[in-house]
Image (cartoon, helix red, strand yellow):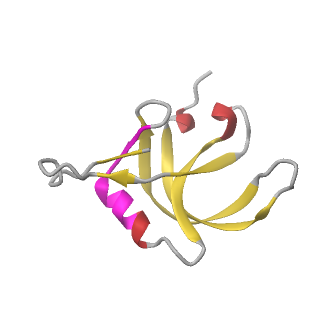
Amino acid sequence: MIFLQSHVVAVVLVEKTGIAGEETGHRFFKIKELFGSAFFINGTVFLTAKHVSRSARTFEGNGASYGLCQKYEEGKSPLNVIVSGSATNSHHRLTTYDWALGL
């Protein structure tokens, strides 16, 4: 079964708040701010608005980082995961458009 939250995800600013357990390696995060959404084109490449990526990056630092919030285990788990990503719109002919690709 495919879940929408596996392909359309929130772009958020998060702060690490702790570790769930040594055996799992999971970390807890607190979502500090929501900037917009991103859409996975395939398993690793996503598309978002350039202003969303730019806004999120300006708030990074002091223990906070930006990433994509998606459902864990392709929607099979009630947990969410934060996937760090970076987006760019650097092609000189396309920088006037409000889009960004990321990995």
In the image, is 72 to the left or to the right of 42? right
In the rendering, at what x and y percent does residue 6 appear?
A: 56, 35
Q: Is residue 64 magenta?
A: no
In the rendering, at what x and y percent does residue 20 appear?
A: 83, 57
Residue at the image position 68 percent from the left and 66 percent from the top: 16
Residue at the image position 50 percent from the left and 44 percent from the top: 9
In the image, is 26 to the left or to the right of 3? right
Q: Quadrant of the N terminus?
A: top right
The boundaries of the magenta stretch are 45-55
In the rendering, at what x and y percent does residue 86 appear?
A: 43, 53
Instruction: Name the foreground residue: 84 vs 5.
Output: 84
Instruction: Name the foreground residue: 80 vs 67.
Output: 67
Residue at the image position 43 percent from the left and 64 percent from the top: 56
Residue at the image position 68 percent from the left and 34 percent from the top: 73
In the image, is 90 to the left or to the right of 74? left
Q: Quadrant of the C terminus?
A: top left
Residue at the outermost bottom position? 62
